[in-house]
Amino acid sequence: MPDPTPEPGLFGVDNLPYGLFGAAGESGGPDGPDGPGGRRIGVRFGDRVLDVAAAARAFRSPHAGLLAAPSLHPLLAAGRPVWRAVRAELRDWLGSPAHRARVEPLLLPLDAVELHLPFEVADYVDFYASEHHATNVGRIFRPDGAALTPNWKHLPIGYHGRAGTVVVSGTPVVRPCGQGRPSVGTDAPAFGPTRRLDIEAEVGFVVGTPSPMGRAVPQTAFRDHVFGVCLLNDWSARDIQAWEYVPLGPFLGKSFATSVSPWITPLDALDAARVAPPERDRPLLPYLDDGGLEPGGLDLRLTVRLNGHPVSEPPFATMYWTAAQQLAHMTVNGASLRTGDLFASGTVSGPEPGQRGSLLELTWGGRDPLALPDGGARTFLEDGDEVTISAWAPGPTAGSRIGLGEVTGRVAPASAG
Amino acid sequence: MPDPTPEPGLFGVDNLPYGLFGAAGESGGPDGPDGPGGRRIGVRFGDRVLDVAAAARAFRSPHAGLLAAPSLHPLLAAGRPVWRAVRAELRDWLGSPAHRARVEPLLLPLDAVELHLPFEVADYVDFYASEHHATNVGRIFRPDGAALTPNWKHLPIGYHGRAGTVVVSGTPVVRPCGQGRPSVGTDAPAFGPTRRLDIEAEVGFVVGTPSPMGRAVPQTAFRDHVFGVCLLNDWSARDIQAWEYVPLGPFLGKSFATSVSPWITPLDALDAARVAPPERDRPLLPYLDDGGLEPGGLDLRLTVRLNGHPVSEPPFATMYWTAAQQLAHMTVNGASLRTGDLFASGTVSGPEPGQRGSLLELTWGGRDPLALPDGGARTFLEDGDEVTISAWAPGPTAGSRIGLGEVTGRVAPASAG
């Protein structure tokens, strides 16, 4: 009988994030022509991936049909009671010594598989929920105005982004071309590859259970609708954004690519990470008031690495608006939810300079370059640069940790057209 | 042999718009639980609908497989040569007296079918392409600033909207709730059902052929990618919009519902409607310059009716930015296109007061109520009001017309929560 290596705490039985995998080399890369038929649901366990469909067959799971799909959507749509039942099964299959012999052959090394976009993004919404980030950006972009707009403390500001360009970690990010502000004294906008390519370190929330049009989803129903979290890099071209965004908001400065981590950590794995959000200094309307509700913040510790070098450690616990408030706001006008909707936190920035989640903030609009250990320096990203965002959260036992994996991407040169 | 009524010009063989239909009463309404299995591709011919799958079988079409799908997407994705070949077949089936006996039983009366959302919306982008509309809105919303922002004449301003709440004509529109600006002298935002529910009369463009990430789609490739047009009502809650939209653009003021007409008119039916857009008074960057290209404007004549009474006749030919420019702009940063992407023109407003495509403009922000023939008056919409946008375009023969059908919706009262 095989004797599996004890699995490390970051991806042990208290975590069990879901993804979608195929055999490595089955496609020509993350954007390759691999048909969905070759895709299977996987759960990360240590440095291996459990073939969930095979396990469900082997253990005669009542959910074997759902888990054999070439997509996470049937499971996402099945709702919280099924999410919990499947999680209990997974913990049993992977955690019981009695099952080792049966489960061991179903665990594949991570480097033998290719990880795909874990779900098809229905609508993608991006919020702006860090007071530190919004204040920094306000000071940099609108130096003559108030840092925060008058609405900021009353509602979680958000906008829709492009769902079709959400890609899985590892997908190269082609430097976008676009218009920038005319030079002083001219009326002709600049055009070319962006000179201010940036990142935004964020946390994404994945909707499982849909809701009908015309019905608001209250904060108390958050866990019935939201399945789990991923890490997200909202790549941004600051020169394009600065010229285009008044009056209708970000568009081409963001829509060229948004990267997400391949693993969706279920909310059920993050119970020990729940924390109270920062104190609110304005009274909130009833649909946003979270006084008396279970704590809606999450103590996720992010790290941003540029070419392997840590440049920031954004603390998600400092976010002013919680994901439950964002969900309640997004639907208070009766907008429906669909399985696969993705909403992101907005850039995570803490109060300290070393906790800022974008280069815009870390270099204060490009004024203060970041020194890199190889002797180089960066204001914004250069071709070939690789940015990786990783995170962990406290686990259920003292000192334990839940890993959220990482989202990474390398900048490719602008294409010829 | 049956002798069919000669079909009227608005939906004759020069038009042939596509939709998706099922038997009336198959579902509980536009939002009912009808499975996609009951849906079939239809083409409107006069006041009847051709069952396209049945016709393709009857005439042994080489495209019968594609046309038997319960969705328009396989046809949309097949590309322009297939679009043209299928259109030629349809013209033959419906136009040749020799085929009358065979085609007649495959034509169903419009009132015997239920029309569904004609395609699944991938990403929804809304532009802001009428100079008259942008100028009016600028004057009303930002009376102290310039009517047009400095970027307006240099790029077609757009933003992403919510794809999941695009609904087919006839779907009731529930009055949304949300926050509005605090009253003067207070810091507490208003909350409740919107008091300024409005419409925006627009034209939507439906993408068929996808494009890869990292590649711009030039104006010259417009007809290879865009399949056809629909009518669109971008319902808007002006009080919610005014409070939320700085700095990241419209969100809940728009995301509760967007209605589209059930018929997608192929671009091939609109050749006679092509017109030059208004003269550009600033030089354009090469990717937007349309000097020397075939005319990119479309002479579509819209009519807006409120409770049956015509209140505006917006002329689409006056739009400053063309759909080909919008497509080129949307992809110049390398954003990919997906089959089912929908991009809309923005509100169509002409230079005359009777040509404005929103109540915001028609009543100048609510200052000048519209008189209705029943003795009533409106600034913004009341519960029970019905708004219908219809349009036609010049056809290929002198005096002939191509109908674009209509998009209609009735306001339902705000729901309890």
Image: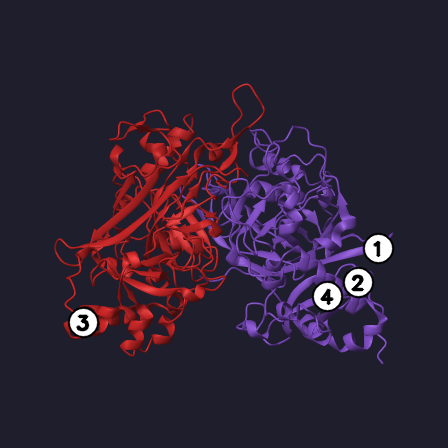
Chain colours: A red, B purple
Task: Tell me what residue is drawn at x 75 percent, y 52 percent.
Answer: B270
* Tags 3 and 1 on a common chain: no
Q: Which mark is residue A100?
A: 3
Count neighbours of disc 1 (C-alpha within 10 A) and say few if under 14, some if 14 to 19, many if 20 or more.
Answer: some
Report the Cα–Cα distance between label 3 and label 1: 76 Å
Q: Is residue B12 above or below residue B154?
A: below
Q: Position of residue A307 (x, y in %)?
A: 30, 38
Marked residue nearer the N-terminal end (1 or 4):
4
Percent x, y for residue B363?
A: 65, 43
Q: Is residue B411 left or right of residue A272?
A: right
Q: Relative to the observer, which residue lies in front, B13 or A352?
A: B13
Mark 2: amino acid: Gly
Residue at 39 percent across and 29 percent down: it is A140
Residue indicated by mark 2 = B12
Give the camera-side residue of B365 and B260.
B260
- The reply to whether discs 2 and 1 touch (Cβ–Cβ < 8 Å) is yes
Q: Which residue is mark 1?
A: B400
B24 to B373, vertically: above or below: below
Mark 2 Cα shell of 10 Å, populated few (<14), some (14-19), many (≥20):
many
- To the question of a shared chain for discs 1 and 4, the answer is yes
Label drawn at residue B44: 4
Numbered disc 1: secondary structure: loop
Disc 3 and disc 1 in contact, CB within 8 angstroms: no
Residue A103, disc: none
Q: In the rendered structure, are the residues bearing label 4 and label 2 in contact, judged by CB atoms less than 8 Å apart? A: no
